[in-house]
């Protein structure tokens, strides 16, 4: 959950690295640092605790000349955030500088062994162990830096993406990856290196996604080399054309990326739909499903694995697929799936959901599922990321880069893809009538305009947020399709405002949470018109009878809950299975404005990073 940047070429190295760190700051912002190698082979390392702006201030009077450089923005795993523990890390003799994203699981064993051979450590990080190990092997064996990197990485257990500079070798950067993202940009006699493509999209559209167990050798004036971690075999270089644009990476006049991304949802949903709902809603074209129709026709069971917001989308996927396709569905946290001895095999389909396509626990779950013979289907946002490469088939959500740490447009994109997947599979299996399918397809096509209408609640929600800014706890309640929506609403509030919030099925309230309700405990109740509406009316009355304050999200024209609730947010009525996309928007806005009122950094909430690439 850190960001790596590297550059070798004739441009201003420091400027490219700093701009790249700002682009990757959503991946980690506990500390940041750069290593710059001058054309004469001098290696300078500068680093600072806190955001990238702190590093810039520290570097103002430093020697910033360089022909090659690497940089890092950190989300701490081993060792507290500090100048001391910030990357890059030197080897003991000062000849190597290394940045690292991931976790070295056996670092303690390696560190103890190195200390017995006289190595002295200056930080608490696992990363320093790796750079010291590379130096030790190089000195012991008298080998090249590539050979030392290869041997060291073969001793390492865990996940990593690394970039390394060697003193007196200003012409090269060495990089490698295993279970942690790394992408190389190829320019005109120059190379860029990063955890994702955002730092270099303005310089080149040609990218190479480094695969697991590959070592990349970047030398100015020479072609890119990809070497095997196991031996001297040289791998083919597979160049991908990037689809990103600079405008997608800027705030576009909004004060925060989160607000921009909330308001982008009419457009991102339209992009997600493009080419997939055709003939006016009468035909669903999901190539990943249709090309594997037999797998879905013969499926005994579907298991959805995901983490965080993606898990909430997966829970909605369960309701959608079971309801439309009549296939049993289980939803697992990927972090638990890998350790609970999953009983899975041929005839099962595993759907893995991840916005970044790099979530470590989800990738591990995919590996287990494949080993056991399951068919694995990926749903991701980032083209070329690890999950699309590791799954048998899948669908991109195509909502564009999501920079805000709290997921908004990616959530609605994931839910929309799952809705289309369920409808596509239901058509294949004949578990839905043609009339029902066509009607739902027509409604799906209307969603971008409906969401645009919901965003018209912005000013009302902004005003409403002031009333609840200083609440200490929130309860979010929903039933049926809107139980997962309530979970997602509570998570958004927790993530960015640091207010404790819990989501519950509304009927479960009386099995415990009702004890918490009083005048200081507001409840957000998601209650559009559906087949459970009368049930949730009863839940609303129970909260009100105990003095609770109620914010209700209801369908336009509601006549019952609107008379009971303290505050009402009306959204357009849509088919029941589409309500989560519509009702989630007001909760995103409510969380945003409460956090802003509290003075929180909504794009970079404390202790969180966008891509969880470590276990």
Image (cartoon, helix red, strand yellow):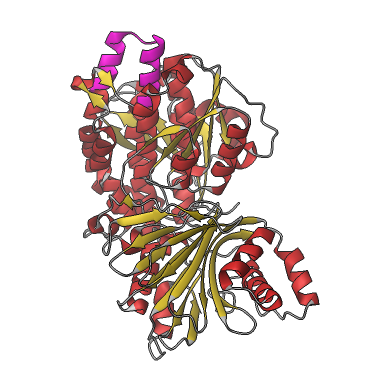
Does residue 142 appear in the picture of this structure?
Answer: yes
Task: Give how far across and how far down residue 251 sits, in percent.
Answer: 26, 59
Residue at the spot x=44%, y=32% of the render?
A: 393
Q: Is residue 586 left or right of residue 110?
A: left
Task: Give how far across and how far down residue 203 sits, in percent.
Answer: 27, 65
From which residue to which does the magenta span run? Answer: 420-442
Task: Give how far across and how far down residue 183 sits, in percent.
Answer: 42, 57
Q: Nearer the viewer, residue 419 or 276?
A: 276
Q: Is residue 583 left or right of residue 107?
A: left
Q: Nearer the viewer, residue 455 or 388?
A: 388
Task: Give how far across and how far down residue 256 sits, in percent.
Answer: 31, 59
Does residue 548 appear in the picture of this structure?
Answer: no
In the image, is residue 138 above or below residue 502? Answer: below
In the image, is residue 211 above or below residue 195? Answer: above
Residue at the spot x=45%, y=49% of the render?
A: 493
Q: Nearer the viewer, residue 128 or 132?
A: 132
């Amino acid at each position: 959950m850190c960001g790596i940047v590297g550059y070798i070429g004739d441009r201003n190295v420091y400027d490219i690295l700093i701009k790249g760190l700002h682009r990757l700051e959503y991946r980690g912002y506990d500390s940041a640092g750069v290593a710059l190698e001058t054309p004469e082979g001098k290696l300078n390392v500068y680093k600072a605790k806190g955001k990238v702006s702190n590093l810039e201030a520290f570097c103002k009077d430093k020697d910033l000349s360089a022909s090659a450089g690497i940089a890092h923005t950190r989300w701490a795993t081993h060792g507290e955030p500090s100048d001391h523990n910030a990357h890059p890390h030197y080897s003991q003799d000062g000849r190597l500088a290394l940045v690292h994203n991931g976790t070295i699981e056996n670092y303690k064993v390696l560190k103890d062994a190195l200390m017995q051979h006289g190595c002295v450590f200056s930080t608490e990080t696992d990363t320093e162990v790796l750079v010291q190990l590379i130096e030790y092997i190089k000195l012991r064996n008298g080998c090249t830096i590539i050979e030392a990197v290869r041997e060291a990485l073969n001793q390492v257990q865990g996940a990593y993406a690394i970039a390394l500079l060697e003193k007196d070798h200003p012409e090269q950067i060495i990089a490698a990856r295993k279970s942690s993202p790394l992408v190389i940009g190829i320019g005109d006699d120059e190379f860029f290196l990063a955890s994702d493509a955002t730092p270099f999209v303005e310089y080149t559209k040609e990218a190479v996604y480094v695969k697991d167990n590959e070592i990349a050798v970047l030398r100015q004036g020479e072609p890119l080399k990809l070497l095997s971690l196991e031996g001297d075999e040289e791998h083919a270089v597979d160049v991908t054309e990037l689809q990103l644009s600079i405008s997608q990476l800027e705030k576009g006049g909004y004060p925060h990326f989160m607000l921009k991304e909330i308001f982008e949802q009419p457009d991102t949903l339209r992009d997600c739909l493009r080419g997939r709902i055709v003939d006016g809603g009468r035909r669903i074209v999901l190539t990943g499903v249709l090309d594997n129709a037999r797998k879905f026709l013969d499926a005994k069971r579907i298991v959805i694995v995901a983490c965080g917001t993606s898990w909430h989308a997966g829970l909605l996927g369960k309701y959608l697929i079971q309801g439309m396709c009549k296939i049993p569905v289980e939803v697992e946290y990927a972090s638990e799936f890998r350790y609970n001895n999953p009983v899975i095999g041929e005839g099962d389909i595993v759907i893995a959901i991840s916005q970044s396509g790099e979530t470590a626990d989800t990738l591990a779950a995919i590996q287990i599922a494949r080993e056991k013979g399951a068919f694995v289907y990926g749903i991701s946002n980032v083209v070329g990321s690890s999950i699309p490469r590791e799954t048998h088939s899948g669908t991109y959500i195509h909502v564009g880069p999501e920079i805000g740490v709290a997921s908004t447009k990616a959530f609605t994109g994931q839910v929309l893809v799952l809705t289309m997947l369920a409808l596509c599979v239901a058509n294949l299996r004949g578990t839905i009538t043609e009339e029902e399918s066509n009607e739902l397809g027509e409604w799906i096509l209307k969603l971008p305009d409906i969401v645009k209408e919901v965003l018209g609640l912005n000013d009302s929600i902004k005003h409403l947020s002031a009333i609840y800014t200083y609440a200490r706890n929130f309860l979010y309640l929903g039933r049926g399709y809107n139980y997962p929506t309530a979970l997602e609403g509570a998570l958004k509030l927790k993530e960015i405002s640091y207010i404790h919030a819990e989501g519950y099925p509304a009927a479960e309230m009386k099995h415990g949470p009702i004890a918490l309700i009083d005048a200081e405990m507001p409840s957000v109740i998601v209650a559009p018109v559906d087949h459970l509406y009368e049930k949730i009316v009863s839940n609303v009355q129970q909260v009100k009878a105990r003095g609770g304050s109620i914010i209700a999200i209801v369908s336009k024209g509601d006549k019952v809950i609107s008379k009971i609730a303290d505050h009402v947010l009306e959204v357009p009525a849509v088919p029941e299975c589409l309500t989560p996309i519509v009702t989630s928007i007001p909760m995103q806005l409510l969380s945003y404005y409460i956090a802003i009122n509290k003075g929180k950094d909504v794009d970079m909430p404390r202790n969180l990073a966008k891509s969880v690439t470590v276990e």
